Amino acid sequence: MFVTFPYPAIRANAKLNNRWLAKQFLERSLSYIRGRRLAEGCRCQACNRKPRNELCEVVLDPNENLIARIGIGRCHFDFFRGAIEELLVEERNGNHANREARICKLETAIQSLSWNL
C-alpha cells in the first residue's frame, strides 16, 4: 500500500513531500530504505516525474506494507537525503528520550542514500 503524501505530487512540492517523508521515516521505528526497485509504470510519489526505469523505495511500516516510492536522483538524493541531514542536525541539538538511536538511524540512512544507490 502506497503512502499518501500531504502535498500534491508536483515538482514545486517535491521538497516539502520529501521533508514530510523524512520525518515519517524517523518517527516510525520499523521504517527502512529498501533502495532501488523497478518502477513498473509508477511515477515518483513526491513530484510525479516519470523515472527511467527504477525508483527508490522507502518502507515506512513493514507490517502494514506501507511504502513510498521516490525518484532516483533529484528526489532521493537532493531532497530526501537533504531532509534527513537536516533532521540529523536537529536531533544532535535536541534532547529526545531516544536521541542516540534516532541519530544512528539517520546516519545509517544517509550512508545508504548514495547518488547511485
Image: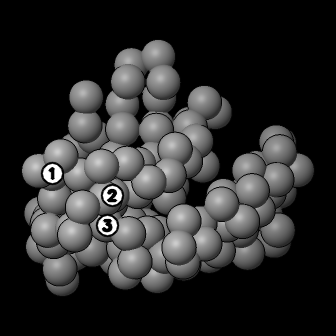
Rounded to the nearest angstrom, the CA distance separating label 3 from label 1 is 10 Å
Q: Which quadrant: the C terminus?
A: bottom right
- Indicate the amino acid at tag 3: Gly
In the image: residue 101, left or right of residue 7: right
Q: Earlier in the sequence, mark 1 or mark 2?
A: 1
Q: Quadrant of residue 66?
A: top left
Asked whether the residues under the numbered discs 1 and 2 touch, taking CB atoms below 8 Å apart as contact, a structural biologist would say yes
Q: Residues within 10 Å of mark 1 (few under 14, many from 20)?
A: some
Q: Residues within 10 Å of mark 2 (few under 14, many from 20)?
A: many
In the image: residue 75, left or right of residue 112: left
Q: Which residue is mark 3?
A: 71
- The number of numbered discs placed on residues in the rendered structure image is 3
Return the mark for residue 57: none
Q: What residue is shown at x 50% (from left), y 58% (from top)?
A: 22
81 over 96 or under it: above or below: below
Rounded to the nearest angstrom, the CA distance separating label 3 from label 2 is 5 Å
User: Which percent across, then down, holds residue 77?
Assistant: 49, 76
- The residue furthest right is 100
Asked whether the residues under the numbered discs 3 and 1 touch, taking CB atoms below 8 Å apart as contact, a structural biologist would say no
Return the mark for residue 55: 2
Q: Which residue is mark 1?
A: 42
Q: Judging from the image, what secondary structure is the residue with disc 3 in?
A: strand
